[in-house]
Image: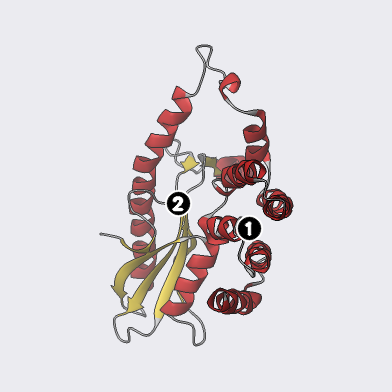
Amino acid sequence: MDLRFLRGDPQAPKGHAIFFARSSEDERHIFYTYCVVPPLPLSLARYLPSILAAHLPMDEPNVQVMPIPPMLEELEGEKGLDYLQVLARYRDDDLCELGAIHPRDEAAKMQLAAQACQEYGQLYLNYSASFEQAASSSSSREGLPALDDLDPEELLFQTMTDRQRLAELGKLVGVARYALEGNDTHLLQETRQKMQRIVRLLPEKYKGNALITAACDAGKHSARIAELYLERAYKLLDEEYADIPRIEQAIRELQQSA
């Protein structure tokens, strides 16, 4: 089968995707599952009683990719494809269409989910070879990380959680505004570069580059717009999605009145 990516790049899958299929009787009815590729092989045998683990195939001890749930389930209520698209955007998931399926064919729902996961897993495996090679090339001759080639501040940013990175961005917004008020171009450039290094480590859904643009802009509403982008990022982090439209509307209004 061929996965149709409505969101994401088949050449660079994220490792987590929402799958959906339409009912062959009524395309408004959507069936879905969620596909996860563990970052490292997951051995289920470690978490099962020995009497059950003994029945696992010895040649396939690790889970490489899995659908959750293991079969396509109907999307409840009035939710449809629009809902899945919004969900995938805010969660930064891939979104893949699987085609049509008979709504009462339970075996087909399970088989389609399994086949789609295997194909997605292969795409991810192909993609992962690139960053595995990058990891290998960054090692020293002894096989240890080449820490001498990394900036201490960069290492700090890499070890931070997304919440800590957003907090650091919030501090740097204040520094950028101070540099603008004092016409300190050197400090502003230095602060912008530091913010860019943090943003590169954050998912695109946080709109970090837009935050940087606003923070480093001298426009009359730029400081407030930067605050709103930061607030929006925290709302996404805390999964408070209901507040997002209000914040985005406020940003648009300020941009239009600038």
Whole-percent x, y for residue 26 in the image:
32, 87
Tell me the quarter of the image containing the N terminus.
bottom left
- Residue 249: x and y in percent read 58, 79
| Residue shown at the point (31%, 78%) measured from the top left | 102
Residue at image mark 1:
215
Which of label 1 and label 2 is nearer to you? 1
Look at the image and tell me whether residue 250 can be seen.
yes
Could you tell me residue 28's position as x and y percent? 37, 85
Name the residue carrying label 2.
14
Residue in view at x 37 percent, y 69 percent:
109
Question: Is residue 164 depicted above or below 211 in this figure?
Answer: above
223 lies above or below 193: below
The CA span between labels 1 and 2 is: 29 Å
Identify the secondary structure beneath mark 2: loop
Residue 127 location, quadrant: top left
Where residue 229 sits, quadrant-wise, is bottom right
